[in-house]
Amino acid sequence: MSHVLTSESVTEGHPDKVCDFIADSILDACLEKDPESRVACEVLCKDDLVVLAGEITSQAKIDYESVAREAVRQIGYVDSSEPFHADGLRFLTKITKQSVEIETSVSAGSDGGQGAGDQGLMFGYATDETPELMPLPILLAHRLSKGLADDRRAGRPAWLKPDGKTQVSVEYCDGRPVRVVKALVSTQHAPGVAQRAIRDYVVGTLAPRVLGDWMPGPDDFIVNPSGSFENGGPSADCGVTGRKIIADTYGGAARHGGGAFSGKDASKVDRSGAYFCRFVAREVIKAGLARRAEVQVAYAIGQAEPVSVMIETFGTGSSVAAEGLVRHFDFRPQAIAERLGLKRPSFRQTTNYGHFGRVGFPWEK
């Protein structure tokens, strides 16, 4: 039996990812000075306006606007001829402290430990179909997006601009990936660049380098299907934090609890719980107990012990043995933060090209 799974990625210059990167930059700035900071930062970008909103309780004194401006500069929006550029931004800031009721329940915890910062459910997934233990479609889509950004920063070709989206469709037979059936790349570019030149770069230079053995034939590429893509980023489209939750995780290959990651400290189990579920799912695969594993955890606000923990192996291994392994892990928020080092200012590194399947993160070891 065969099927095709398609996954999407976006570059760091995509409007939503600009917002995610600003939010994670503010989070890291707080954690750098106060590891106990409680941060829930949301961002909206449109034209020259950046809206910063949310709840932050921290001993750190942060110039949020300066942090946001530098984040935008690092992404590459520095062209003063466009509405959205680092030196021309206006800010509307509505940041208050975390609710005392929530802060008290989370800090103390009704069962003796740090309580969860909210109720909710999170999933983690792993599969042995790639060395990264990630689904192949999202892995390849991220490689294309990151390749666009790497080439832009290197100035090859010089007409590449920050915004872009990619999509990869992979055919599976009997649960295993066999070929890429379609690859889609939409990239922002400087004015006056011929669409043929863009296609030649994608098919002849970018894709062979990043896709390797999974490179499809030339006829299986779709490049800038809308035609010219000169206007991009927040100058053209509104960006908001938390709108790329499927690209951030498994590209649709696994379920999602609905919570976004960026701008949230480790007490927000939307983030820490999802990271730990990925860690545990990887352990199931690494132990040889299944070829695919999905872990779900659920919490009640203010309580440290999870409401439930579930493991699904999709008939690819021993569900009993997998459940036995999973039960040995401590899913309490404080234990997760300590095990994964989530009070360190390292979240800006996670924002782009997937929170999972990348070398260097503690939940990927």
Image: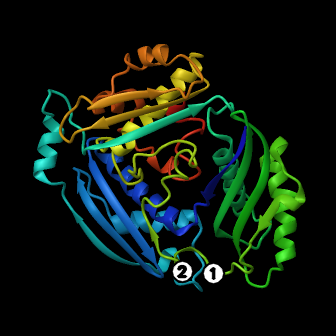
Q: Give the percent coordinates (x, y) of residue 57.
A: 21, 52
Q: Give the percent coordinates (x, y) of residue 42.
A: 35, 62
Residue under numbered circle 2: 235
Taking the spot 56% from the left edge, 48% from the top edge, the residue there is 252
Q: Does the image show residue 27?
A: yes
What label does residue 151 carry, if any? none
Q: Does the image show residue 362?
A: no
* Quarter of image, res 292: top right
* Quarter of image, res 205: bottom right
Amino acid tagged 2: Ser
Camera-nearest residue between 4 and 354: 4
Residue under numbered circle 1: 231
Q: Is residue 255 above or below residue 151?
A: above
Left or right relative to 103: residue 350: right
The N terminus appears in which quarter of the rendering? top right
Amino acid tagged 1: Asn
Number of residues whose C-alpha sits closer than 10 Å to that of mark 2, classed few (under 14), some (14–19) or many (20 or more): some
Q: Do the residues labelled 2 and 1 touch (CB within 8 Å)?
A: yes
Q: Give the percent coordinates (x, y) of residue 98.
A: 19, 54
Q: Is residue 15 above or below residue 323?
A: below
Taking the spot 44% from the left edge, 73% from the top edge, the residue there is 45
Q: Is mark 1 on a helix, strand or loop?
A: loop
Taking the spot 48% from the left edge, 13% from the top edge, the residue there is 321
Q: Is mark 2 on a helix, strand or loop?
A: helix
Question: How many numbered circles are shown?
Answer: 2
Q: Give the percent coordinates (x, y) of residue 365.
A: 54, 27
C-alpha span from label 2 to label 1 = 7 Å
